[in-house]
Image (cartoon, helix red, strand yellow):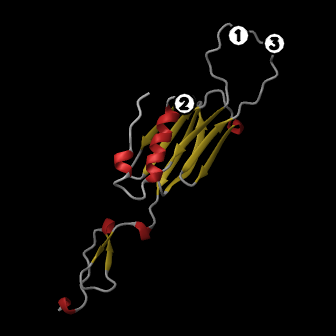
Amino acid sequence: MNRFDFTPYRRNTVGFDRLFELLETTGRAAQNENYPPFNIERTGENDYKITVAVAGFKIDEVEIVAQQNLLIVTGSKQSESNDNRDFLHMGIANRNFERRFQLADHIHVTDADMADGLLIITLVREVPEALKPRKIAIGAKTATTVIEHDAAPTKKGPQAA
């Protein structure tokens, strides 16, 4: 097992404990989790899509729970009463699962749909206006400009003349 040592980074940073714990936990969990298969896709600058292969599951057997920074997809297969079935080969997985996705700050689930054995979860990053980077005009008491809008800062005070 290859394990990366974060000690040099931990002693030179402040407030990144959650990130290092997330990397260590994900590294351990990734070795044992491979069912069900999934894709994570970036569809735009702030848009993402998670596609989970849930073949054989019905809509009422799959549950999606979104918590702060965590998305949990659970599949609970209802037991069938066909105990007299004699499989010669059983290659289609028919077991319960729980798949966890760690979400970055301000990522929200906007939609979920299931078709053709695929569960498609749509996510978007919505950064609040108060947390977006702003340009601060020098010499102005209240003049600030949001960087994304690329507007020219207004000048106030003695230099405005």
Give the camera-side residue of 13 and 153: 13
Q: Nearer the viewer, mark 3 or mark 2?
A: 2
Q: Which mark is residue 84?
A: 3
Sequence-wise first label, 3 or 2: 2
Q: Which mark is residue 33?
A: 2
In the picture shown, does residue 9 fall above or below 143?
A: above
Q: Position of residue 124 (x, y in %)?
A: 48, 53
For the residues labelled 3 and 2, the Cα–Cα distance comes to: 31 Å
Q: Position of residue 44 (x, y in %)?
A: 39, 49
Which residue does the image show at 46% across and 36% down from the upper left? 27
Q: Quadrant of residue 7?
A: top left
Residue type for callout 1: Phe
Residue type for callout 3: Asn
Residue type for callout 2: Glu
Which residue does the image show at 31% across and 68% down from the upper left? 147
The number of numbered badges drawn on the structure is 3
Q: Position of residue 104 (x, y in %)?
A: 47, 52
Whether residue 128 sits left or right of residue 112 in the image: it is left
Which residue does the image show at 57% across and 30% down from the upper left? 36
**Label 3 SS:** loop
Dots 3, 1 in contact, CB < 8 A: no
Q: Quadrant of the N terminus?
A: top left
Whether residue 78 sits left or right of residue 6 in the image: it is right
* Mark 2 neighbour class, 10 Å CA radius: few under 14, some 14 to 19, many 20 or more: few
**Label 1 SS:** loop
Q: Position of residue 139 (x, y in %)?
A: 24, 85
Q: Which mark is residue 87?
A: 1
In this view, which residue lies farthest toward the top? 88
Q: Which mark is residue 136?
A: none
Which residue does the image show at 32% across and 68% down from the upper left? 149
Dots 3, 2 in contact, CB < 8 A: no
